[in-house]
Amino acid sequence: MSDRNPLFDDMNDRTREVFRRVVEGYLQSGDPMGSRTLTRHLEEKVSAATIRNVMQDLEFMGLLESPHISAGRIPTELGLRLFVDGVLEVGQLGDDDKNKLEATLGTNSNDVSTVLDRIGGALSGLTQGASLVLAPKQEAEIKHIEFVSLAPDRALVVLVFANGEVENRVFTPPTGQTPSSMREAANFLNALAQGRTLSELQSIMGAEITSRRQDIDTLAQALIEKGLATWESDGGQHDRLIVRGRSNLLADGDANDLSRIRTLFDDLERKRDIAEFLELTDEGQGVRIFIGSENKLFSLSGSSLVVSPYMNADRKVVGAVGVIGPTRLNYGRIVPIVNYTAELVGRALTNRS
């Protein structure tokens, strides 16, 4: 995956093989690996006592740990990082996996969110983890804006874009809204929005409201500010993060695992750091792996994230796709799946543009 850690080069062949066997066993079963078990799998025939000494050395180096007294060893986060950087062999994406991902693009839909939702579902199903897809910001010019009353305390703001896509948000309108104030708010915004993108509209809206405050009804002013705020507030940003496959993380695991997963779900629900999800990919193109506490998004969950950016037709990074799961993810299989999914999303966006 990257330049090999010097720590790995400092090991002799026996130590490297013991380390590799322990990590591979953990990634496959999640169980600690004992010295007696290792003696049956090593190419070199050595005693269990010798293996225990090697494992103690690896533990002293911070690469292995013992979860219970007298138990075998499992890799630490540092050990997993060393394995990923120096030992991991990334496989080729199989035709079956490729076909399942490509099948998500089989219908012609102008709703990018629907397409990304299907891709997220397929990614989760293939990896048996939770998939994360960060949708791109909508940068097409606005064609029409409308406010729709759903209830006294609920309203819908609908945006129709020049490329045919439609987005809407439910929000809580200011108290006392009337049909006439909704029409006035929509008329004001439609006159202002012509030929502008959503981000451009948001940047000038405040100044326009201030300069024309006497011309706009007070209720309409409040509705404009509250309605479009749903796109720029935390809640609006968070709607860009599509999460699928939470149940996959609950299928197995002990009480400690379930507690960590609940913490992860809490993070996903709050989505406090959604901007950082895209920032995780800024240091370079291609797939990146974040293990445990290396992961700025979910450092408390004891999970790993495999993530890759995707680009639009202008080769600009506009979003990201990833898989999150326990630290014993099947990295060798998941890395090419995430990489191909990112390529697929980028291609889909390019075709639609």
Image (spheres, rainbow, N blue to C red):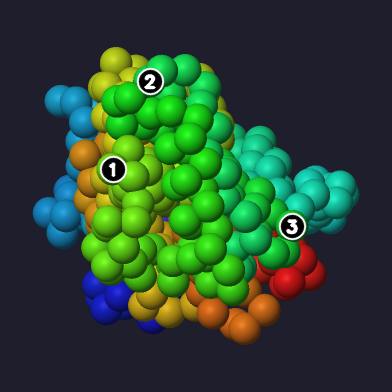
For the residue marked with disc 1, what is the amino acid? Thr
For the residue marked with disc 2, what is the amino acid? Asp
Which quarter of the rendered picture does the C terminus lie within? bottom right
Q: Nearer the viewer, mark 1 or mark 2?
A: 1
Residue 181, visible in the rendered structure: yes
The reply, left or right, for residue 296 in relation to residue 23 is left
Q: Say the numbered circle drawn on residue 153.
A: 2
Q: Say the numbered circle drawn on residue 15.
A: none
Image coords of residue 86 (percent x, y): 41, 70
Which corner quadrant of the image does residue 8 belong to? bottom left
Report the residue marked by disc 3.
164
Foreground pick, 57 / 80:
80
- Ranked by sequence position, the earlier of labels 1 and 3 is 3
Name, please, the residue furthest toward the front: 214
Q: Residues within 10 Å of mark 1 (few under 14, many from 20)?
A: few
Residue 84, visible in the rendered structure: no
| Mark 3 element type | loop
Image coords of residue 203 (percent x, y): 35, 69
- Identified at 50% across, 30% down, the residue is 179
Q: Nearer the viewer, mark 2 or mark 3?
A: 2
Label 1, label 2: how many angstroms apart (C-alpha)?
A: 18 Å
Foreground pick, 293 / 216:
216
